Amino acid sequence: MPTHIIEENSVPFVPTAIDPVTLDLIENALRNARVEMDATLVRTAISPGIREQGDAFPLIADRQGKMIVGQFGSFIDGFLKGYDGTIEEGDMIFLSDPYSCEGAISHSNDWLVLLPVFHVGRLVAWTAMFGHQSDIGGKVAGSMPIDAHSIFEEGVRIPPVKIFRRGERNDDLVRLVMHQTRKPDWCAADLNALIASCRVAARRVNELCDRFGDDVYVSATQALLDRNHRAMKALIQSSIGEEPVSFEDYICDDGIGYGPYRIRCSMWREGERVVLDFAGTDPQSNASINFYLNENMFKMFFGIYMIMVFDPQILFNDGFYDLIEVRIPEGSLLKPKFPAALSGRTHALGRIFDILGGLLGQRTPEFLNAAGFSSSPHLMYSGREAEGNWFQLFQIGFGGIPGRPLGDGPDGHSLWPGFTNVPNEFLERYFPLRIERYEALADTGGAGLHRGGNGILMSYRFLASGVVSIHDDRWFTYPWGVNGGDPGARARKIHERPDGTQTIVPNKIDRLEVEAGDQLHFITWGGGGWGDPLDRDPELIAKEIRQGLVTVEGARRFGVVIAADGNVDASATEVLRTRMRAERPASLGVFNFGADIETLRAACFAETGLTAPRQPVW
């Protein structure tokens, strides 16, 4: 244990053999406690980002800080390495500064609460929860300025501090933090929700210790970590070769004229360990798209991807981390130097999942996903209503999920599996806007044997003048298709005036002024397709046309001809597919990236009316 952990009971823990039934009871009790953390959070938070969308991540860890159950990997290791204070029973830590915890949280909007759990004077566990705050101050509403050149422009930064010291709440600290935000009511309620969630989980851990004893509980957490280690060791040995493989993808731009930015990763196995090396990734940006990638977080991403592809029954936890070595160059987009801006890091965060798919699938293409976890689209809308009241919306959008070996990608789904949309009724009730259209946009998913999920078209009609910020990507890089599948469509954002005049706006923009009556057509990317489109069942295409997911013209991407009565024209379909097969290359290749990236970049900058794109930084 770190020396700054103060335990009143210094009796060492005794390793205890755990029978399978007891281990199963403790494992499932912890799983349930994690679910209870989420339930507590959404019932007590106020901001739509947390209450409605679930933008928060729970964690229950062992006494060393290793995650036993959770969603996003352990935050505690990075915190302990940089923390020089003491930890005692009754303490609770509060922080939001990524540079103080090695990027365990990756931008200052994420507020993290850490609770050490003591039982009979001994540390037995940690519980933790972080959630995205809709506003923490800074130069723009929403606190994620695209053009920020340092983290100091992005709102309040909270170093690791004690919000509770030996059970006593630090009210002055809370008042100071709330004084920085445009939405103190939301932030105060959300902070209390984070605290309550951690306390619920701590209570459940103590109940387990009361029931089974400290020694059994601590030994059980170690057994769960060991079991995961054995499972991941076998997966690594069977799935990853010693010969290096590499993959690269691009963040389109940084919102201030530079781009694309390359993210490159190479992977190979050395004995029992897998090495993931980001050499070749571009230098950090002068804007806010940098992603301070915590090594343990990336290990968790890697482990989750491996588990979900090869054996979803494995409980993922931190037990396998010593089997993975992550190398990230200092000063790169993924390990920027302080005080680089970090608020727009979700584009790189999403792209990491596409890159993992491209890496892990090269040896076994039958398990390869297409691209589509590509970003996390954000919309911010703020201003004053006619009565003078301040309003401020932060909303996360959804794109098309990629085609997969086992089937189609879902239409308009979330990057994060636990997220949900903000209901339109909620938006229209609490904000001066109306949702004119909300639909999966036909033909945006990449064609394939398994179709990529369609992107979303969400049309906002603004009822009050205000200012809009948009954060999205994949607007000039395609979500690539695999194994013969076509890329998904790119994202687009269109500002429409009441007279019908339309202007295409960049996918990264702050301070877009809108007036009452204006519309914003917010179109997200589609997922890439999987497999040969000409092998897809024509009757399934006809069904999707009736469902509004594919158009009659879009059916021709699959070589399918639809007759006037809406049914498949079998003979015309056979003729078209025969001609398409004859005209294309004999080998479709593993990846289909679409058009040349530089051509796409120039076209997208031109259609938005921006100046000619400047040279990328690399």
Image (tube, grey):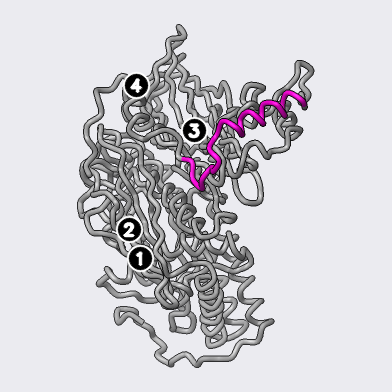
What residue is disc 3 on?
524
Image point 48% across, 67% down: which residue?
Answer: 240
Nearest to N terminus: mark 4 or mark 1: 1
Amino acid type, residue under disc 3 in the picture: Thr
Secondary structure at badge 3 equals: loop
Q: Which element type, helix, strand or loop, lies under badge 4? A: loop
- Determine if residue 23 is in view: yes
- Residue 466: within the magenta? no
Q: Position of residue 280 (x, y in %)?
A: 28, 54
Identify the image quadrant of residue 86: bottom left
The segment highlighted magenta reads: 571-592
Of badges 2 and 4, nearer the viewer stands 2
The tag earlier along the polypeptide, 3 or 2, is 2
The correct choice, above or below, for 402 with respect to 558 in the image is below
Tags 1 and 2 touching, CB below 8 Å? yes
Residue 203, position in %: x, y? 54, 70
Q: Earlier in the sequence, mark 1 or mark 3?
A: 1
Compute the Cα span from label 4 to label 1.
38 Å
Quarter in which the N terminus is drawn: bottom left
Residue designated by label 2: 278
